[in-house]
Image (cartoon, helix red, strand yellow):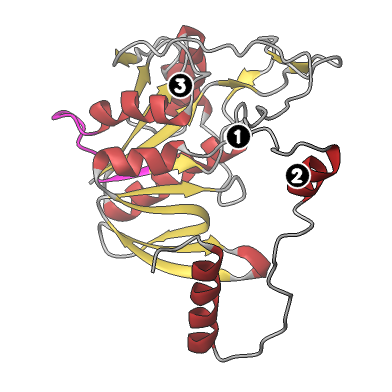
């Protein structure tokens, strides 16, 4: 079994412009988020239970090599850096990572990601990866425990304090919260042994994406409406306000769900939203 952990090299302590809210990377707090480190720990636990190997894929620049060596010291078998930039939409990042994950030399059975990135915070990369790989997905997990080889018992957080228990079979993509597991501490001997370890470089270049600062509030585009007709101002005002248009008076209806659905559809038809 091969378990892949996807991590992202980000600025954990960026500066925010107080005028227009633009996020500026300082380069002084680069690293992996708690969710990404938790994903690596979950991958290591699955590998220990299934007697498998762990490979870490990182979307980031060359400076991420030092952080990948720390993950090698923690027990990761291989580290691969994909691309040379990291600030891209989740769909673009997944499109670059997926060919590497499904390649002949990797062919990962289970992919573990953090539930959201520390820079953009969209959390869409795991879902896009599952789509690209044609794998099952279990996202936003608060627990992931190995069962039989290739099967994971996962618990997902739902709204209203509820939980959903899943049994996920490989191939699958999991995303975990930062509280699922704390990355194990690397022994000193392993940390010294990987100081000059080579990190593979794969895939195409992920261009750096910088959004221009927005200096004025966003306003929706104005709709184009026909001018009101009428010879007198009163006629035009009446047409604009619709004061003389027949309207359906509001009413309160208590029905069972099937009858309520029929009543809603019939009202939409009466308003002209649905064709008869």
Q: Can you tell which mark lies on residue 12? A: none
- The numbered mark, 3 or 1, whose residue comes first in the sequence reads 3
Asked if residue 87 can be seen in this view, the reply is yes
**Residue 142 position in % (x across, y down):** 55, 57
Circle 1 residue: 121
- The numbered mark, 2 or 3, whose residue comes first in the sequence reads 3
- The numbered mark, 1 or 2, whose residue comes first in the sequence reads 1
Badge nearest the viewer, 2 or 3: 2
CB atoms of marks 2 and 3 within 8 Å: no
**Residue 16 position in % (x across, y down):** 78, 18
Circle 3 residue: 68
Circle 2 residue: 240
Residue drawn at 79 percent across, 17 percent down: 216
Residue drawn at 33 percent across, 23 percent down: 96
Q: How many marks?
A: 3
Of 111 and 69, the residue lying toward us: 111
Query: Would residue 213 be counted in the magenta stretch?
Result: no
Residue bounds of the magenta highlight: 102-111
């Amino acid at each position: 079994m091969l378990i892949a952990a996807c991590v992202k090299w980000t600025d954990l302590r960026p500066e925010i412009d107080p005028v227009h809210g633009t996020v500026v990377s300082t380069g002084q707090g680069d690293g992996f988020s708690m969710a990404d480190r938790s994903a690596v720990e979950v991958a290591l636990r699955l590998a220990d239970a299934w007697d498998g190997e762990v490979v870490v894929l990182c979307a980031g620049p060359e400076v991420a090599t030092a952080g990948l060596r720390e993950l090698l010291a923690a027990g990761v078998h291989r580290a691969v850096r994909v691309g040379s930039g990291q600030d891209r939409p989740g769909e673009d990042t997944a499109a670059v990572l997926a060919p590497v994950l499904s390649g002949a030399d990797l062919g990962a059975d289970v992919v573990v990601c953090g539930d959201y990135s520390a820079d953009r915070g969209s959390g869409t990369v795991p879902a896009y990866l599952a789509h690209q790989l044609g794998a099952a997905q279990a996202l936003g997990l608060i627990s992931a425990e190995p069962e039989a080889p290739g099967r994971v018992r996962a618990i997902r957080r739902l709204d209203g304090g509820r939980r959903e228990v899943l049994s996920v079979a490989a191939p699958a993509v999991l995303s975990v919260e930062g509280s699922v597991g704390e990355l194990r501490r690397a022994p000193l001997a392993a940390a010294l042994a990987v100081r000059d370890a080579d990190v593979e470089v794969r895939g195409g270049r992920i261009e750096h994406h910088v959004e221009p600062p927005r200096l004025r509030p966003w306003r929706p585009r104005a709709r184009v409406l026909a001018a009101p007709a009428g010879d007198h101002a009163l006629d035009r005002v009446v047409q604009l306000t619709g004061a003389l248009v027949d309207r359906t008076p509001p009413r309160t209806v208590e029905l069972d769900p099937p009858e309520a659905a029929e009543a809603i559809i019939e009202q939409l038809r009466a308003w002209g939203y649905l064709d008869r």
